[in-house]
Amino acid sequence: SYELTQPPSVSVSPGQTARITCSGDALPKQYAYWYQQKPGQAPVLVIYKDSERPSGIPERFSGSSSGTTVTLTISGVQAEDEADYYCQSADSSGTNWVFGGGTKLTVL
Amino acid sequence: QVTLKESGPALVKPTQTLTLTCTFSGFSLSTSGMRASWIRQPPGKALEWLARIDWDDDKFYSTSLKTRLTISKDTSKNQVVLTMTNMDPVDTATYYCARIGDGDYGMDVWGQGTTVTVSS
């Protein structure tokens, strides 16, 4: 079955830039989405269609795509950005959606 | 304002069938382009996509759970229902429903989730 691969953890100091990657064979053909989840809360969409930002999401969140890897970049990380981040996409058919294993972002 | 709320039993026994209801407001699943999904998250683990239903009643399921899942909608009640058969303790999780807006906008609004424990 199709899988998306994320690093389990990323650590950055406040004000630095955090980059979280997500790899999958179908990513050149399928959009990727990123969700932020804080403890005890439902996920929140932070990036859609690889690089678009929903209204209300701070400009420091951005997304990019290159080949089989998509990247969530958080510029000028703040303490409140500490959370789990999940990428989501679909297999090559577009009908089987999957999430990556999640990345825990720690703000040192 | 779009809201979704999941409801269902907090505890089910192994082998039983789970039925979860997502009641929503602020949008209609009879509107072209609208879709809704179910997602679950076992304690301390990653999100897992389960199923999706579209405005035109197209349905899509996780390949690994396809044989156990059924998704349906009642547009008059603004509800989406998920049934999962043959429940097992590994199905213990928080179950979320989410709206997918018109176009490829992702799961843009989520419910608060409902916790289901599978135990005898």
Image (spheres, coloured by chain):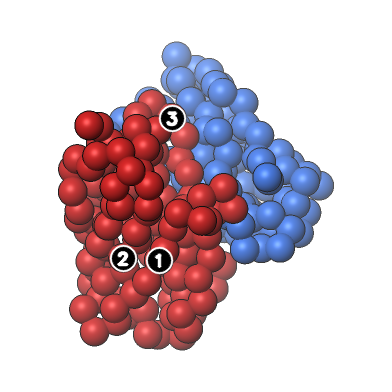
Which residue is denoted by mark 1 in the rendering? Answer: B71
Which residue is denoted by mark 3 in the rendering? Answer: B45
Quick check: A4 above or below B3?
A: above
Instruction: Tell me how far mark 1 sits from mark 3, CA to CA.
Output: 23 Å
In front here: A38 or B28?
A: B28
Name the tint of chain A in the rendering: blue
Name the tint of chain B in the rendering: red
Which is in the foreground here, disc 2 or disc 3?
2
In front here: A35 or B48?
A: B48
Q: Is residue A108 visible?
A: yes
Give yes or no for contact between labels 2 and 3 (Cβ–Cβ under 8 Å).
no
Q: Quadrant of the N terminus of chain B?
A: bottom left
Image coordinates of residue B90 in percent, x first then y, are: 40, 33
Which is in the foreground here, disc 1 or disc 3?
1
Quick check: A83 above or below A57?
A: above
Q: Which residue is at 41% across, 63% downward?
A: B70
Q: In which quarter of the image is residue A24?
A: top right
Q: Quadrant of residue A7?
A: top right
The amino acid beneath tag 1 is Ile
Q: Which residue is at 45% across, 14% downward?
A: A108
Image coordinates of residue B32 in percent, x first then y, are: 46, 85
Which residue is denoted by mark 2 in the rendering? Answer: B81
Give yes or no for contact between labels 2 and 1 (Cβ–Cβ under 8 Å).
yes
Q: Which residue is at 25% across, 76% downward?
A: B78
